């Protein structure tokens, strides 16, 4: 594949806050630790606290993988490496989208793998392993129950309840057939179908199905997949659960950071609550709130705890307490020897709201690395881009802008009336001077006539452009089709399309091409063709 790279701000697709972070705006400096560069990694490695839970993490990973370890020495070796104090994780996380959902799911993991490789080459005395943190405790099933292949939406129509990771995939057989039926009859299609069926047609939980499928795609790269919805991992987090619920420490710190960010003109992505935990069982995941009489209620379940009972419940059953979006990052950094978190634009923004909370708990704050973003096409489409006198940078502009610019470049006529307006402006200056001499009160009338003429000339200029567009109708139709091809549903390809379309075209080499061409610390948008 050939690659070209574009500045993120030229894509018109990313938030003001993310661009300010990448641009090293000084006003954002208090909201993160070290800069996301090699110097930042060197500083964090030097200052990183000793990680106390390596044996627990290694044992838990081996337990979770079970028989899957037998077919990947790379994964097994990376788990072994975690026992060493010189090994660190590079982590990304995402919900359990069926069949991996949109492309950026894959891009997150590839960014983690590539960054771990790059860091090993720069810091050979340390080891770095990529981790995919499965958001198994998330309960927003509507966000993950579908994917899109060749423009077709494929959905798992099931009633979501409790944590999505605990859901039974037995009812997915028809969805699996729909998905695999889009693959065609190639050898690659047969191989991908087997990967899908081995994961989603065995009646596993969605967490195990996701692990099985993602492992089949990335096992040769040593990707470690972690499900944090386990009692032994929650036990080391229990004291933080107590402090958040009983002392409401997190709320005050995050609220203050959020207000500070907003006062600087940046939009907040999440809002902390007084209590940032859900009560989790196989049947439900509901918020915990404090009642007026000082007890703690699990909403909609008629479950109440006194403060003493709640402390006992946390200590005896920490697995029943599920962090929300603002406490999950803290949980992650406590149970992993982590250096960097790789997230999408919105994730990076809400992590900026969290540093003060990490500081008050004395937990190291990771480097924040925006995942690689990419647009992937082929030589045929690339040829159309260049034949239409466009570039991969310009195609990110709005469709109407592209059409107007194309016509103005191609036309043999001068469509702008700017020169004529300059002449008119000079004439009106003389008229205004004459009317002022006769009657100063006529000045506003002169300006009104000038404004009406300006509006009329603008309308005429638009008509000239519209008329010239008819002379280039074929090319403009091609531009419109090109935009539809590169930006499905008017948005970035990575936010809509499933990876399968590209995987079927390139096979397992597709992942290798992404790894080869992604540059995690360059912070450029990647175009591959």
Image (tube, rainbow, N blue to C red):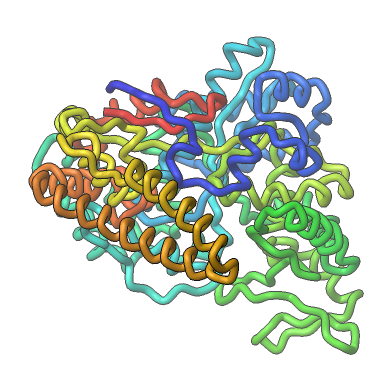
Residue 389 coordinates in the image, percent (x, y): 21, 31
Residue 185 coordinates in the image, percent (x, y): 9, 43
Question: Which residue lies at the image location 40% right of the left edge and 20% below the top edge?
Answer: 516
- Toward which corner of the image does residue 297 lie, by quadrant? bottom right
User: In the displayed structure, does residue 48 sit left or right of residue 421?
Assistant: right
Looking at the image, residue 116 lies above or below residue 422:
above
The answer to whether residue 315 of the structure is visible from this angle is no
Asked whether 398 or 92 is in front, the reply is 398
Residue 517 coordinates in the image, percent (x, y): 40, 23
User: In the displayed structure, does residue 193 sit left or right of residue 28?
Assistant: left
Question: Which residue lies at the image location 29% right of the left edge and 57% below the top edge?
Answer: 489
All told, the count of numbered labels is: 0
Looking at the image, residue 202 lies above or below residue 409:
below
Looking at the image, residue 45 lies above or below residue 483:
above
Asked whether 134 or 456 is in front, the reply is 456
Asked whether 398 or 379 is in front, the reply is 398
Image quarter of the C terminus: top left
The answer to whether residue 277 of the structure is visible from this angle is yes
Question: Which residue lies at the image location 80% right of the left edge and 65% below the top edge?
Answer: 314
């Amino acid at each position: 594949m050939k690659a070209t790279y574009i500045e993120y701000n030229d894509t018109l697709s990313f938030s003001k806050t993310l661009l300010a972070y990448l641009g090293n705006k000084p006003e954002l400096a208090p909201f993160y630790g070290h800069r996301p560069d090699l110097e930042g990694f060197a500083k964090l490695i030097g200052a990183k606290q000793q990680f106390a839970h390596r044996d627990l993490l290694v044992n838990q990973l081996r337990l979770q993988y079970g028989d899957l370890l037998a077919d990947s020495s790379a994964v097994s070796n990376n788990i072994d490496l975690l026992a060493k104090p010189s090994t660190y994780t590079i982590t990304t996380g995402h919900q359990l989208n069926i069949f991996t959902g949109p492309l950026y799911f894959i891009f997150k993991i590839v960014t983690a793998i590539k960054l771990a490789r790059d860091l090993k080459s720069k810091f050979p005395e340390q080891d770095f392993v990529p981790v995919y943190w499965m958001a198994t405790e998330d309960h927003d099933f509507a966000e993950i129950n579908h994917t899109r292949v060749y423009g077709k939406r494929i959905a798992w129509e099931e009633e979501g309840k409790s944590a999505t990771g605990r859901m039974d995939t037995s009812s997915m057989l028809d969805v699996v057939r729909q998905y695999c039926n889009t693959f065609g009859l190639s050898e690659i299609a047969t191989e991908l179908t087997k990967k899908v069926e081995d994961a989603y047609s065995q009646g596993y939980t969605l967490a195990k199905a996701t692990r099985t499928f993602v492992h089949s795609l990335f096992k040769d790269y040593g990707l470690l997949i972690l499900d944090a919805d386990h009692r032994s991992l929650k036990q080391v987090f229990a004291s933080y659960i107590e402090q958040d619920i009983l002392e409401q420490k997190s709320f005050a710190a995050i609220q203050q950071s959020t207000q500070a960010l907003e006062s600087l003109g940046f939009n907040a992505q999440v809002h902390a609550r007084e209590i940032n935990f859900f009560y989790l069982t196989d049947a439900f995941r509901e918020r915990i709130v404090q009642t007026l009489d000082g007890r703690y209620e699990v909403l909609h379940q008629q479950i109440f705890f006194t403060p003493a009972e709640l402390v006992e419940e946390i200590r005896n059953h920490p697995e029943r307490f599920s962090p929300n979006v603002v406490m999950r990052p803290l949980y992650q950094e406590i149970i992993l020897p982590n250096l960097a978190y790789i997230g999408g634009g919105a994730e990076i923004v809400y992590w900026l709201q969290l540093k003060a909370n990490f500081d008050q708990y004395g937990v190291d704050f990771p480097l924040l690395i925006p995942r690689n973003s990419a647009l992937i096409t082929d030589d045929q489409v690339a040829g159309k881009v260049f034949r239409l006198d466009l570039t991969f940078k310009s195609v990110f502009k709005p469709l109407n802008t592209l059409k107007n610019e194309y016509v103005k470049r191609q036309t043999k006529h001068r469509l702008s009336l700017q020169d004529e307006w300059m002449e008119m402006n000079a004439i009106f200056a003389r008229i205004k001077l004459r009317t002022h001499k006769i009657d100063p009160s006529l000045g506003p009338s002169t300006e009104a006539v000038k404004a009406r003429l300006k509006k009329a000339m603008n309308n005429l200029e638009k008509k000239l452009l519209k008329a010239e567009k008819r002379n280039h109708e074929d090319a403009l139709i091609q531009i419109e089709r090109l935009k539809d091809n590169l930006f499905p549903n008017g948005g970035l390809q990575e936010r809509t399309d499933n990876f399968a379309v590209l995987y079927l075209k390139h096979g397992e080499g597709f992942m290798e091409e992404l790894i080869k061409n992604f540059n995690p610390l360059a912070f450029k948008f990647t175009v591959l063709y």
